[in-house]
Image (spheres, coloured by chain):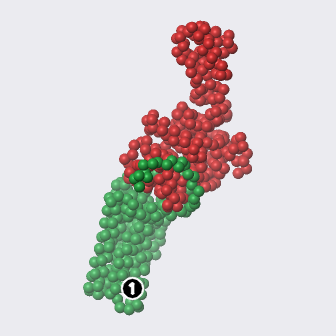
Chain colours: A green, B red
Amino acid sequence: MSTEQSVIHDIGYQRYTGARLGRWYAVRSLYTHALRTCFGLGRSVKAKIFPWFVVGIVVIVAAVVTAVRSQIGEVVLTYPAFSDSVSFLLLLFCAAVAPELVSRDLRTGVLPLYFSRPLTRSDYALAKLAALITAVWLVLAAPLLLMFIGGAFNLDGLRPVWDEFLDFLPGLAYAAIYAVVFSTVSLLVASLASRRAVAAAVVVATFLVTTPVVGVLGIAGGDAQYLAFIASPFTLVQGIGVWAFEIESFDIGQYGPTYGLAAAFLAGICTLLLVARYRKVAQ
Amino acid sequence: MTWLEGVTYGGQVTLIATESLTKRYGGGVTALADLTVGVEPVIIGLVGANGAGKTTLIKILLGLLAPTSGRVAVLGLDPAVEPEQVRARVGYMPEHDCLPPDLSAAEFVTHMGRMSGLPKTAARERASEALRHVGLYEERYRQIGGYSTGMKQRVKLAQALTHDPDLLLLDEPTNGLDPAGRDAMLTLIHRIGTEFGISVVVCSHLLGEVERICDWLVAIDGGRLLRADRVASMTTARDVLVVEVSEGTDELVTQLATLGLVATRDGHTLLVPLSTDDTYDLIIGAVADLDLPLHRLDQRRHRVAELFREEPADVH
């Protein structure tokens, strides 16, 4: 190779005659690229530390839960309840990854290069959002799958395994709700700050400042105490868990569907605001 | 689309055409006012002072901004109607910094190629090619953060070139470069236009810089067109000889007048229109006859800048 490199053949400029795959291909590529970025793949070791730290912990929690279950022979943590127990780690994951996805691009000024290509501003925002939702879901789905496999090994016969599988599916669905709510909120917040550290701090702050609000509303009494948990993303999703996934936690009275609607509304409005944000940015 | 077919110049395809193009921003700022211009390949210089509306025009050409009124066509397409098709065939190099410092040039340009619709393998190959053409082949696996300003400008050019566009829009490509870097960048742009078969629009606030490499010049000021024409038609038959003698300038003027040459004084020098090949000999003869010490006799092209001064706003 070295001998061949010593001669430089200038073959001139070659026009490209191959396929041009257009906008949807670009959007898919951006999604894949962003999903890899979430886990620091194709990036420096430094970028891998945090995501894999979170993944490591949730997997260890799942492994411990599975081991305990196989020892004492009863379910210590249901699949949906597992997501609740690691929700704070999800917040840390979002706080680390969302700025990595959007704040970097804001800071380096690379956005005009994207927008001068076939994909649109909304495509960019939605591809990044889809990637974050997928990443958060995977962070939950991997340990859930581990729990399912571990649990299924301790069961005899197909019937119990099938029942176990039917317990497992709501766990994945609940994980998806967590992923959508947490990702939309944190990506919107992160897209407002171009410094990664600031963005991460603001994401954490957004989730944490709402927690005392729940406490204040909770002591109001009347129906307000049932609705108080809507005020924070953590307890908002947990409210859906109480309502639809039979998790035993706080009392939401008859307001279960309200929690579902509130979560859908929050995710929807954050997505709209994110798209609106990218209509204005880097003009 | 019919008006597009009407605006061809000299039988060639019109690269960019605008008709009464106007852009007003909120707050009453008029960036472009009633701009009508048509240019054909290959290298077009878009000159104007900072704030003249160059960047606004580029953004309208890319379909990133909608004009307030008027029409525009790029490569025969309307960017307001088919922005995706236009942007797939156009490469854009912005003026400001736009590079992530922690990626290698090869990775970054490959990613940008995929964003333009190139399949994975092709994107990687084209990125290497583009970086080779801008002269960054050896350094392409180094992180961009460690590059000099000149190298960064080349990466910006490479990412605009990687998907083999039909038209390159370069916004102040020589920004922040030292004189040698400017020359290298201009030579590269000239090569892209002449050898690669890609049309180029070069935006600059420095007329003297782009006039060297451009076939066409479009000058705008305050969003209005000052002049748009071929560089050749602006400079031909306008070449002058500069004569400088240390004494006896007046006698020389009289002597040249008897030979039928109209010399005009310009400070210490005389300007004589270069009408035929004999003009040189006539001047040298006249200087020799008067036995004057000749300091300088050379040909000077009319600086395009002077043309813009002499004939302001003749294409409104």
Q: Amino acid at mark 1?
A: Glu
**Nearest to the observer: residue A175 or residue A52:** A52
- Residue B26, horizontal then vertical, whole percent: 55, 45
Report the residue that reaches farthest toward the front. A3
Q: In percent of the image, x 57 and y 8: which residue is there? A: B291
What residue is rendered at 47% in x and 69% in y? A264
Give x and y (percent) for residue A143. 35, 75
> In the shown orientation, is residue A148 left or right of residue B93?
left
Residue sitting nearer the eye, A13 or A182: A13
Element at label 1: helix
Q: From what the image shows, is residue B248 above or below residue B67? A: above
Q: Is residue A126 visible?
A: no
Q: Estimate the x, y position of residue B130 in percent, counting from the top left.
A: 50, 50
Which class describes the residues within 10 Å of circle 1: few (<14), some (14-19), or many (20+)? some
Task: Depth check: give the residue in front, A211 or A156.
Answer: A156
Q: Residue B216: name its quadrant.
A: top right
Which residue bears the numbered disc 1? A164
